[in-house]
Amino acid sequence: MAKKFTVTPWKVEGEVDYGRLIREFGTEPITDSLLARIRKHTGELHHFLRRKIFFSHREMGWLLDQYERGDKFYLYTGRGPSGNTHLGHLVPWLFTKWLQDKFDSELWFQMTDDEKFLFNDSLSLEESNSMAYENALDVIALGFKQGKTFIFADTDYSKTLYKHALKVSKRLTVSTAKAAFGFTDSNTVGQYFYTSMQSVPAFLPSALKGKNIPCLIPHAIDQDPHFRITRDIVPKLGYYKPAAIHSVFLPSLEGPKGKMSSSIGESAVYTTDTPELVEKKIRKYAFSGGRDTVVEHRKKGGNPEIDVSYQWLRFFEESDEKLKAVHGDYKSGRLLTGELKQILIDKLTVFLKRHQEAREKARKVLDRFVIMD
Amino acid sequence: MAKKFTVTPWKVEGEVDYGRLIREFGTEPITDSLLARIRKHTGELHHFLRRKIFFSHREMGWLLDQYERGDKFYLYTGRGPSGNTHLGHLVPWLFTKWLQDKFDSELWFQMTDDEKFLFNDSLSLEESNSMAYENALDVIALGFKQGKTFIFADTDYSKTLYKHALKVSKRLTVSTAKAAFGFTDSNTVGQYFYTSMQSVPAFLPSALKGKNIPCLIPHAIDQDPHFRITRDIVPKLGYYKPAAIHSVFLPSLEGPKGKMSSSIGESAVYTTDTPELVEKKIRKYAFSGGRDTVVEHRKKGGNPEIDVSYQWLRFFEESDEKLKAVHGDYKSGRLLTGELKQILIDKLTVFLKRHQEAREKARKVLDRFVIMD
C-alpha cells in the first residue's frame, strides 16, 4: 500500500515518494538525455544534477530550445523569510548560483515577507520583513553576481509587484486555488491572494523590459502548486510560461525521508550556527543507519540510504569519488556512524566558516543587491 | 408583499426600500436629535441632511462624543474610477466638502483603480488608473482644501497600502466575504482580497501618525458591506472603528427608485456634458410625474414623488423655499413637466458651468492633491 504523505507549499509531512510526486503534480523526470543536453552548455554537471537532487522539471527542453536560438533566460527563486536560513534553504540557491555562473543569467530573488506573515499566526509583518534582509545576507554570501542579482521583499517592492499581481488575481478563481492548495472557506482572503504575488517575478522582467524573456525557476518541489497556477495564467497575460526545475528536500536531521523544518529547532542546522553547535546537533540528533553495536556494525555494515549524515553528504560533498568511498566504507562496516558523522561535521564546519565570513561581508553590499520602490 | 431589490457594492437593482436597508444592514436612521446635535457644531444643516438624502449612519454619536472631547476626526471617501464622473457620484463628495468646511477635517480620498479593474472584465488596469486622475479633477473642482485633502490611486500608493491591507486580509476569511458580498467560488482571489484595500484608509492616518484618530466615512449606502468588514477587523489591529454616514442614490433619469448607472449612458448626466447635451438628456429621458395631457395635468396635478426632475432638484436646489414652491406648483398642476424640466436644466447648467471651469483649473493643481509612493 502506498504510504501517505503531504506536500504543499506550507506543509511537508510523511515519507515523501518523489516518483509519485512527479506523477501527481504532472511534472517530468530529469532524464539522462536532458542532462546530456545541459552538459553541452555547462561543460560539467553540478553534483545536484548528477545525484538527482534536482530530479524533476517543467519544460527545460523548451527553455534550452530558446537558449540555443540565442534567447537567454533569467532565473527566479525565492525565500519565505520566517526565520533564520537553514541548510535546506540553501539547496535551490546553491544550484541557482551554479546556473547563474554557467548561463550568465540575471537572478530575481523574491523574499515573501507577505506570505510568511499571512500563513503564520504568531509572526508580525515587521518581523518577516526584517527577516527578509537577514536571509538576503545568506543569498549574497553564496556569491551571486552583483548587478545581475535583484533581491526584493514583497512589501518593499509592492508598488511594482501589486499591480502585476492584480492581473494574475483577476484570472484566478477561489475554486482553482482550493484545488491547487487544499484551501477551504476558512482560509483568509490574504492567503488566497498571495499566490498572485508569487507569480509576478515569473514575468516581471518581461513586463518591465517590454519583451518576452524566458524564465527558469529552480525551487524545491513543494512550491510547484503555485507555479502550476502561474503557468496557467501568465500566457493569458501575453508572457511565456516559466520553466522550472525541482529539488528534493534536504532531510531533517532526525529522519531521512521528510523535509528539514525550522519548526523543530533540533532538526535543522542554521547558517549562523557555531561549529560547536553544529557538532552537537549532528552528534546528538543525526539519524543513524548504523547497527546497535560496533561488533554488529563491523560485521553486517550500516545502511547509508537511511543514514542522515550520509544523505547530507550527498548534498554537501561535491566529489563523487569521496562520496562513493564513504558509501562503500559505511555499507561494509569499515566506517562507524561516529566516524561518518565526523566526516559530515568537518565538511559543514569548512562550509559554514566560509559562509559566515561571506555573510558578514555581505552586510556592506546588501544595498547593491536589494531593489525596492 | 415586499418588493425585491438588490444593493451590493457592485450592483443596485430594483426599487430600493431604504428603510428596509437600514434594518437589513443593521445601520441606524438619522434622527432629529442627531441632526440637532450636528447643528450645534455646524451652525446649519446641509440640505442633504435636512432632506434625509443622508439618511443612515453608524456611530455618529460616538464620533461626536470624541469631537466634543477635542478628538478631531478625519474624513475618508472614494471613487471606483471606471469611467467619467456623473452627478450621482458627486452626492457623497458634495456632502464631504461641507463636512470638511464645517469640521476643518482632513480628507483621504481613495481612487480604487484596482477594484474597477478586478470587477470589470473589459477594463484594463491602465484605463482605470488613468481614469482615477480624470475623476480626481472632479473632486478638486468641488473646492476641497489643498494641504488637507489627499487623493490617491490604489496602485500608485500600493507600497503604503498593501502592507496594511495584508493585516486586514489576514483577519478576513473567504467565508465572511461570501456572507458579506454574496460571492461564490467562481469569484476571483483578487475580488476577495480587494475589500482589504478599501479598509486601509479607515485607519491609515492613525497608522502613519502613530495615534488613534477617529474616522468618518460619508458614502452611498451600497458600500456598507465593505465597511461592516472594516469595522469588524480594525479594532483587532488596534484602531478605532470608523463611523459612517450613508446617502441614498441619485436616481437614474429613467426612473425614480434605482441608482444612476454609467452602464446606461442615457440614464446619467456626466460632469463633462455640454449644456446642450444636459438639456437633451433631461428633455428626452427624465421620467415624468406629469399627466398624459396638459388639460388633465392642470386639473389633477403632477406627482413630484415619482418625477425625476423634481427628485433631482431635491439634490441640487439648496433653497427649501424654492423647492417647496416647485413641489406645490407641480402637485397643483400650475407647473407643467416641461417647465419643471426647465427649472432643473437651468439649475444644472449653472452648476456644471462653474464645475467645468473649476475642473479645468484643477489640472494645474492636481499634483498638490495627489499622494503616491
Image (cartoon, coloured by chain):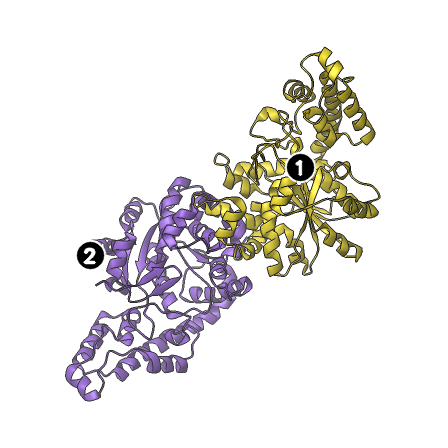
Chain colours: A purple, B yellow
Residue reaching furthest to the front: B1
Q: Which circle marks residue B193 in the picture?
A: none
> Mark 1, residues whose alpha carbon is within 10 Å: few (<14), some, or many (≥20)?
many
Could you give the CA–CA distance between mark 2 and mark 1, rounded to whole angstroms? 70 Å
Residue reaching furthest to the left: A299
Please indicate, yes or no, whether residue B213 appears anywhere in the rendered image: yes
Decide: is A41 above or below B88: below
Q: Residue at x 82, y 48 (%)?
A: B41
Q: SS for tag 2? A: helix
Decide: is B204 above or below A360: above
Residue A320 screen position, x and y as percent: 23, 70
Q: Which circle marks residue A32 in the picture?
A: 2
Residue A102 screen position, x and y as percent: 32, 57
* Circle 1: residue type: Val
Decide: is B333 above or below B71: above
Q: Residue at x 67, y 37 (%)?
A: B248
Q: Are marks 2 and 1 in contact (CB under 8 Å)?
A: no
> Mark 2, residues whose alpha carbon is within 10 Å: few (<14), some, or many (≥20)?
few
Left or right: residue A79 versus residue A310 is: right
Q: Residue at x 62, y 53 (%)?
A: B231
* Circle 2: residue type: Asp
Tell me the chain of label 1: B
Q: Which of marks 2 and 1 is in front?
A: 1
Count how many numbered circles sit on residues in the image. Answer: 2
Q: Nearer the viewer, residue B152 or B116?
A: B116
Please indicate, yes or no, whether residue B373 appears anywhere in the rendered image: no
